[in-house]
Amino acid sequence: MNFYEFTSLFASTAWGPWLIILLVGSGMYFAFVSNFAPYKKISTGLKLIFEKDSDTEGSISKYQALTAALSGTIGLGNIAGVALAISIAGPGAVLWMWLTACVGIATKFFTCSLSVLYREKDRDGTILSGPMYVIKNGLGRNWMFLAYFFAFFGMIGGLPAVQSNQIVQIIRELSFPEMVSQDMLVFNLSMGVLITLVTGLVVIGGLKRIAQASAWLVPFMGGLYIFAALIILVLNFNEVPGVIWLIVTDAFSGKAVVGGTLMGVILYGIQRGAFSNEAGIGTESLIHGTARTNNPIKQGLVAMVGPIFDTLLVCTATAVVIIVSGLWLESSYSGVTLTAMAFYQELGVFGTAVVFICVLSFGISTMFTYSYYGAMCARFLFGKVGQKIYSYVFIATILFFASISLESAINIIDGSFAMMAIPTLISSILLAPKIVELAKTYFAEKSL
């Protein structure tokens, strides 16, 4: 069994109908038990993003927590991930990505509220949060095996597998195609070294440097990407209704996916949706749990805005541009290259430049955030020494992932995310009544 076959077996074993039921079913459960409060309070969540809580406990602001979390989702998951979903499972996969975002709003409200509620402070003043602390402080000693389970796969899921791979791919295929044709491995490793140096400067700086970098990078690059996509949508306005109809009808056909099964379309769409918004995976609660806030519900309301931005907005923009271009029907393009060529077909060099710049920026910023996720999992298992060692290992693995196949990189993350979702959602379901009561109290006070 070679490396690709091993990663493929890992991902296919981890993902199955049972996980779809867990992800979607838990989101629906959270929506029902909260009387759909997250959906009714979206405007409140938007207002809270810029609220100042300078005198309360926490490491970073609500805005910094949201942008740092978005830098991990709005980037390659919605640029390369959407392209992969469409090229492999057809336009219908997008509908299932939308579904994960819709139920993900409620899921993020609960998981991130719990992360703030059960966070703890280390002796050095560091705020420690995430599903492992929710399990430790919320469920108790008998459930600690779930905390260790999450932390172990969190270290793997936090590695820069897809990010470094896709950054190198877009540089290789759009910037230096002639050079690459001579020696691809040397080029991949050379670019990997460069990415390693850039990423290492921020990763070693820790959470605050990551939050500061994301706070200005995400709004600017996200705005640039959406602006370019809107131009394409305006230029092809007459085709947009047909594209939406194709997404809806194709979602129930199963024609485009390998094997031609409807379950294949659903499964791949939800896989890419999980990578797109990370709702239920537990990653974002690691960083939202460190926000300065005097009430867990506040940060839950801020966190739940994430799927609206990353999946319902950026994912949809990417999907429509790719489908309008017609390039998804050609097997010669995949991943980030498909997105770049779709933008190029509609906007020429400007379109390619936008995707190129955004992939570089979001790819690197995603690595910043993922390094924090993995390092915090390592700290939970092995203490401060483990956190420091993980940061260096993370930087070193950029070279490795820059040179492997995209399929292997995707499999590693897919499998790890599936494993991380199990303890995250089990603990959140068991502790959901706590958040329901806190939410009732918070909203009652605000209505006075």
Image (spheres, rainbow, N blue to C red):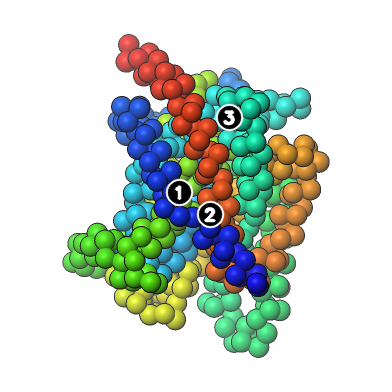
Name the residue that disc number 2 marks: 14
Whether residue 57 is visible? yes
Amino acid on which disc 2 is placed: Ala
* Residue at x-position 53% and y-position 20%: 294
Q: Quadrant of residue 6?
A: bottom right
Label located before the other in sequence (1 or 3): 1
Mark 1 secondary-structure assignment: helix
Q: Nearer the viewer, mark 1 or mark 3?
A: 1
Give the residue number, with chain letter if any, for mark 3.
Answer: 134
Q: Position of residue 319 (x, y in %)?
A: 35, 63
**Chain-order first, disc 2 or disc 1:** 2
Q: Quadrant of the C terminus?
A: top left
Give the foreground label among 3 and 2. 2
Is 139 on the left-hand or right-hand side of 263? right
Instruction: Give the camera-side residue of 127 and 20.
Output: 20
Find numbered disc 3 in the image and state the secondary structure of the residue it sits on. Answer: helix
Among the 4 quarters of the image, the one containing residue 183: bottom right
Amino acid type of the residue tagged 3 in the rendering:
Val
